[in-house]
Image (tube, grey):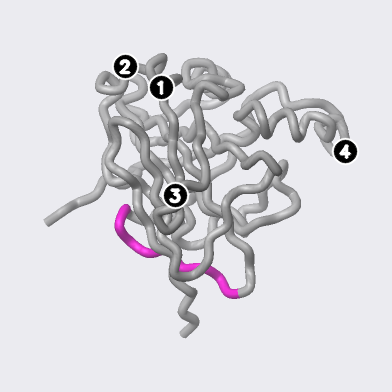
Amino acid sequence: MNIHWMPEGTVYGTLLNFQREHARWAPRMSEAPYKAPPQAPVLYIKTANTFTPAGHSIALPAGKPVAVAAALGLVMGDTGVAGAVLFNDVAIVHESYYRPPVKFQCVDGFLGVGSECVPLQRLGGLDGLTGLQLELRINGVHRQTTALAELVRDAVTLLANVNEFMTLRCGDVLMLGSDCLPDGSRPLVHAGDTVEISATGFKPAVHRFEPEVIA
């Protein structure tokens, strides 16, 4: 029996942590309601109902555009980061990305989880993550490369900044963020598509998207 790794705690996502997307949003960061750029990491939560194991299907709500994004998550252990996992962070496309509503981020099944937590020492520690590139393919066609060298806050800095205002407990996951395409969007998926996210040292995270079945 093949048992895939699954999160045991809370999964946190990070917004605006890639240089290209941060630059695109910078002119709007001083608008209402915030009127200033964020000083701390901007986080959101992926709730337990969103977790979809590798190799399983994700249901797409009818009539709503859905985007996918490659992300790397840091898995907390008893004494710090224990390992890292690939994720497919799925969301309904929405205007208010800077303030992401739960109803667009936390739809049932909307976090594709990689099949394994790779021990941090095998990846060269937190500093070793900087050289990783995440590849996203839809139906076998390359759609995006996400380079962790282009993070605004690298893994060490993001973790330290988050720990300044909250405690990450054993089993929690902190995703480093996801990047946008050059036009500011993220790749869209449709019913029947298969999305594969891969990186050196990891087994690919593969999920198929199916139309939602309404009883």
Q: Which residues are magenta?
A: 54-62
Label 2 or label 3, whichever comes before in sequence order: 2
102 up-or-down from 17: above or below: below
Q: CA distance from mark 3 to mark 4?
A: 37 Å
At mark 3, the secondary structure is: strand
Label 1 or label 3, whichever comes before in sequence order: 1
Q: Residue placed at 53% from the left, 39% from the top?
A: 13
Mark 3 Cα shell of 10 Å, populated few (<14), some (14-19), many (≥20): some
Please name which of the two marks, 1 or 3, marks the residue nearer to the observer.
3
Q: Are marks 2 and 4 in contact (CB under 8 Å)?
A: no
Amino acid on which the number 1 mark rests in the picture: Leu
Residue lying furthest left: 1
Label at residue 32? 4
Label at residue 124? 2
Q: CA distance from mark 2 to mark 3?
A: 26 Å
Mark 4 Cα shell of 10 Å, populated few (<14), some (14-19), many (≥20): few
Camera-side residue of 59 and 198: 198
Amino acid on which the number 2 mark rests in the picture: Gly
Q: Residue placed at 42% from the left, 55% from the top?
A: 195
7 up-or-down from 74: above or below: below
Position of the N terminus by quadrant:
bottom left
Q: CA distance from mark 2 to mark 1?
A: 7 Å
Which residue is identified by label 1?
Answer: 129
